[in-house]
Image (tube, grey):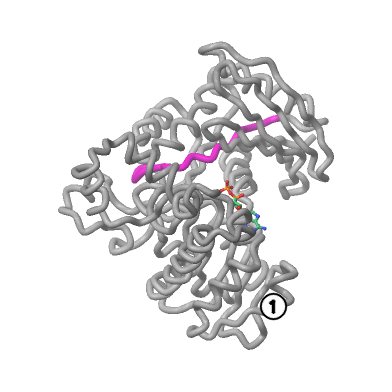
Amino acid sequence: MSDGLLVINAGSSSIKFSVYVTDNGDLRLTCNGQLEGLGVGITPHFFAKDADGTVAADDLWPPVEVGKQSALLGRLIDWIEDHLGDATLRAAGHRVVHGGSGYSAPVLVNKSVLDDLRALTSLAPLHQPHNLAPIAALSELHPDLPQVVCFDTAFHAHKRLEAEMFGLPRKYYDAGIKRYGFHGLSYEYIAHRLEDLDPQAARGRVIVAHLGSGVSMCAIKDGRSVDTSIGFTAVDGLMMGTRCGSLDVGVVLHLMQQDGLDAKALEKLFYKESGLLGVSGGLSNDMRVLMDSDAPEAKQAVDLFIYRVAKEVGALATAIGGIDALVFTAGIGEHSAAVRQRVCDLLGWTGVRLDAAANDGHAMKVSAPDSAYGVWAIPTNEELMIARHTRKLVLG
Ligand code: ADP
């Protein structure tokens, strides 16, 4: 009889889930899917597919009443248990965006952990509450099911001071106002995967570009995060789908003083209305739409995105003293040959060369044999990383 592990990645309007079973020491995906429409009065849409892609469920569930949202999670768990065959659900692992200074590795959930994580909500206001909601609900529904929290910040927890500090009076650093870093589960997975594909480079100096709807980059040396583009909150660093990335703080002051924007309005502007969406004049936050568009604003948004990614490679290479491998991952990094080509064109001075056929054909290694370093397009798998951590903590 094998053990089942549920991985949950909860957002504001949907819960994405994956179910793994232990299989001779490995973890095998059995199904994944999502539950959309979590709000009160909305009709939830439940969709799941088996590991081979067969649709296992595509149903509308009855809307829930106020205070009864946990019933949706109960129904999801029932479906998973029915779908597990002869495996038994042994634990749930959750993606949590912020672990603050206190959590530098995955941990088992208890009340005090949950309280600590709730106290970090202001550091990730648009993610943390949604990540935590199903944990609390599951604790009530299935108090005996062990739950593990895995943090996007944890992989970066051992950066040196220069990679963490802002140029602010040090009392702020002491109070936790520092550069934490995100997308850590993705970087950790990629570091492990590169170990299989190119062990020598994986033990050297690696830059990973996680280019999804959230965007960040990480400099990794000897398999450990040395520095990253993204900082105190998930709005920092590179330009993203709807987030602006790094901004002169003078702009914030100007918008407050001259335009009278308050904190709520600024949050909406920086997290929801900026990035590719904002620069393209509201056209789209989707890279595919912008690349297919003839509008000059779309072209400017794409150009700015690519310029900032390439520039960041220069900064991160300095942090680790060079580059042995450059890895592209997440939606844009994995699927857009054009973005990879254009970033590498700007980095031509470093001696990088892509193999056009490999890049256009979406091979895993996309650099040419005479490139100064290997360039890779590796699919990330944050869910598998969470499942691995959960298995280790719960099953040993
Ligand atoms: P999330 O951060 O939500 O997990 P993903 O990693 O799935 O996001 O990335 C989503 C982004 O990937 C979207 O902006 C989408 O435009 C982009 N994307 C997906 N496929 C392609 C493609 N073929 N070319 C360019 N961009 C793509």
Image spot of residue 99 (x, y percent): 41, 42
- The residue carrying mark 1 is 356
Tell me if I can see residue 9 in this picture: yes
Q: Locate residue 65 relative to residue 129 in the image: left or right.
A: right
Q: Quadrant of the C terminus?
A: top right
Q: Quadrant of the N terminus?
A: top right
Viewer-proximal residue, 354 or 220?
A: 354
The stretch in magenta equals 89-102
Image spot of residue 349 (x, y percent): 48, 85
Report the residue at 80% width, 39% height from top: 50
- In this view, the residue farthest toward the bottom is 370
Q: Locate residue 186 relative to residue 231 in the image: left or right.
A: right
Relative to 116, residue 257 above or below: below
Image spot of residue 303 (x, y percent): 49, 66
Tell me if I can see residue 157 in this picture: no
| Residue 93 falls within the magenta-colored stretch | yes
Viewer-proximal residue, 68 or 211?
A: 211
Identify the secondary structure beneath mark 1: helix
Among the 4 quarters of the image, the one containing residue 29: top right
Viewer-proximal residue, 360 or 154?
A: 360
| Residue 298 falls within the magenta-colored stretch | no
Report the residue at 44% width, 35% height from top: 128
Image spot of residue 119 (x, y percent): 34, 32
The amino acid on which the numbered mark 1 sits, given as a three-letter code, is Ala
Relative to 220, residue 38 above or below: above
Q: Locate residue 274 relative to residue 172 in the image: left or right.
A: right
Q: Does the beta carbon at disc 1 come under 8 Å from ligand 1?
A: no
Viewer-proximal residue, 296 or 180?
A: 296
Report the residue at 36% width, 43% height from top: 100
- In this view, the residue farthest toward the front is 295
